[in-house]
Image (spheres, rainbow, N blue to C red):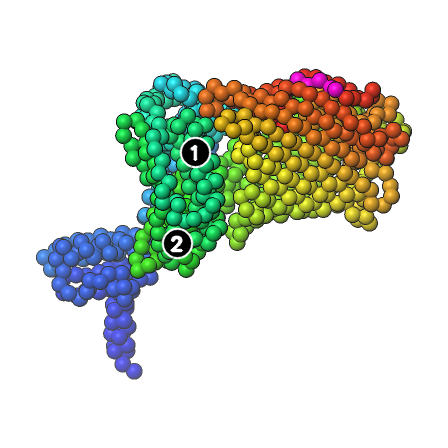
Amino acid sequence: MNYNFLIILLFFCLFNFSHIKANNIEIIGLDKLRIDDLKNLTEIDLNEKFDDNKINLLLQDFYLSDLIYDVIVSKSNSGYKIQIIENKLIHNIYINGNEFIKNEQITDLLNSKKGTLFNKNSITNDINLIKSIYASRGFKNSSIVVSTENFSKNKLNLIFTVNEGNQYSISKISFFGNDNYSDKYLYSLINSKQQNFYNIFSSGSNLNQDLINFDKIKILNFYKKRGFFDAKINYEIIERNKNNLLNFYVSEGKRYLINEIDFFELNSFEIDEIDNLVESFHKDIEKNSFYYDFDLINDFLISLNSLLFSENITNKSISHEEFIAQNKVNLSFVSKNNQSLTVNKIQINGNAITKDKALRSKIFIEPGDFVNDNSIDKIKSDLTNLKYINSVNISKNIIDNKSDLLIDLSENKKTGNFLLGGTFSGDTGLGFALGIKDLNILGSGNEIDASIDLNSERSLFKINYKQYPYVNSNITNSYYFANQELDLTNSYGYKQKEREIGYSIGYVYNENLRLSSGINYINYEGYAGKNNNSFIKDNIGDFNNFLLKLSILSDKTNDILYPSKGTFNSLQFELSPTNISDDAYYKSRIKNDIYFPVKNTENFFFISNRAGIVQSLDGSKVKTGNTFSLGGLNFKGFDYRGIGPFSDNIYLGGNKFFTSTIGYGSSFLFDQKDNVYMKLFYTTGSLWDSDYSSNSNFELRSSVGLSFDILTPVGPISLSYATTIDKDSSDKNKSFNFSIGTSF
């Protein structure tokens, strides 16, 4: 055998796959890569003669590859020698120097991952990402150093060394020059929060320069939306050690009025309902003293385009044009043709925290679907409404009737909060609350809420996890666990421990209608009864119940806290089946609210109805713990659990109840936020049919009163005074009521 020939052949093969020398270049250092791999990375012919210009172009192509870490070029009289340093796989990632933020909170968000190729561009992005995470926590001077160590021939360890620096907070936020809107209202608009005794654990207290710049834009946009087109916003940070003063300086300028409105093009649609929308829009503008208000205009456009969609008109949409001159605005509503395009791809940018698939699950169209301006507006609205998204911008790149949708996001990078505070209820008095909540846990778009709630009647620990499936953003899976102790000695005459676990599935049918159903397992343990009367003794012991629940909610009101127009309806049904539950019963509750606005005013009339029924399924008595109660916040003028039958001063409750309230609402308007809402009301109702009382017949009670709801930094505070008109001799009165929350 010719060994010399084999050696020469072997040398030739090695040279061919790992080394090249042609004309005036020589490439060395190849290990895993082969010459053919390099040829695929560039369009330049490696066999041609090179000069400095071609070498630079070749290096640019090589640097774009994830396979190559570095390229070293040396030049001699004979040509160029190019040494390739190949990328290695990341064996492990280490974070050093971090005390405030845990390792996994950083590594879970890095672009670099174990088992992937080391990439310089990813490292640059990772450094900026870590700095962004620290900046959101108030570490404005953090620095990151990256190093590597060889683990093996083809693997390395990636090391991020963090110098956190000092954490800075905002001790006070002030506003200057804001004549039309109060400090409190502007403060409610921004995400930066000052450090107070009740939010010392809140991430909002941290100094975050990016967040402050975002707040500046947010305040400016608010003013422009309200017609202050010449407004200017600046800010100043005054450093005081680690605590800083944040001052916003507002130059409001004049507020522009709406001069003329042109609806001419709307007549071409010949839809009667458009006339009703136009009339309603005119009334809204008049109520606003004819000042420009973008929200009113936008709500009108949404209603118009929704109407077109319901009439199956998809090739047209309605927009508006503004002509501004001499502090006045002329509006013109115009019809335009919608260009229906096929979606080629959807690209999402700016989501450093939120997972891509979590965001895509909120987008109702996919590549291959048709898209027009209306559907793009809906995508923008759906994404903006997410609690962890600050702003959304969508642009189109159209090629041959196909469009790439480019979605740029601004995230709320800190969605978790540690909450500590006091509570007060007119029913249960002072309380204490401690909670941890994250609205976008691990970037999944899911929510977790864990809290401890203490008051004079109960101590409750609960965890609620909401999961939004990626396959359907209208569905919510909720998992619930709770452990609580109730001291009902002064009302029902015993104490009780409860351990509960449950699951429910919710479905958003449309923006007004929500459905949910679920199953809960509850273990009750009643103890420490005051006496041996049957209405107490029946609650003493250990009981296991399985509850099937159904809820239907329809909300067509114009405001969550203080509605003045629209309707609200809800139905709740609960079934504890025989054979599998110790207490077999069904319970149903309904709620109905109707609001009638008074023409050309901010005032309104309202009707509020409540009713409920609970019945045993096996012929036994309905325990007092499963009955309804009336009085206090749900029937003002009477004490908490002050209506209904008593025995030996023990409350028995009732199997049936109803209340009906009619009233008149108004507000003392200080500015757009600082309102005191006033309601005059008359309530009638009854609680009856206790299984433990022979005297629990249907008897009407009634009261009349006045309530005030005041917005404060700690939430809405409700004050009410009511006096009884019809009452039973055993009922307990309470004229004045105070709570943190709304009146009705």
The outermost residue toward the left is 77
Q: Secondary structure at mark 2?
A: loop
Residue 299, image x and y in percent?
44, 38
Q: Earlier in the sequence, mark 1 or mark 2?
A: 1
Separation of residues labelled 1 and 2 (CA atoms): 27 Å
Q: Which region is colored magenta?
A: 720-725
Residue 607, image x and y in percent?
64, 31
Residue at 32%, 36% (x, y): give it.
Answer: 322
Position of 431 with respect to 71 (left or right) is right
Q: Quadrant of residue 275?
A: top left
Position of 58 with respect to 307 (left or right) is left
Image quarter where the N terminus lies is bottom left
As rendered, which of 660 and 182 lies closer to the eye?
A: 660
Tag shown at residue 282: 1
According to the picture, the residue beneath numbered tag 2 turns out to be 315
Q: Is residue 664 visible?
A: yes
Question: Is the stretch drawn in magenta largely helix, strand or loop?
Answer: strand
Give amino acid for label 1: His
As rendered, which of 240 and 120 lies closer to the eye?
A: 240
Work out whether 82 lies above or below 464.
below
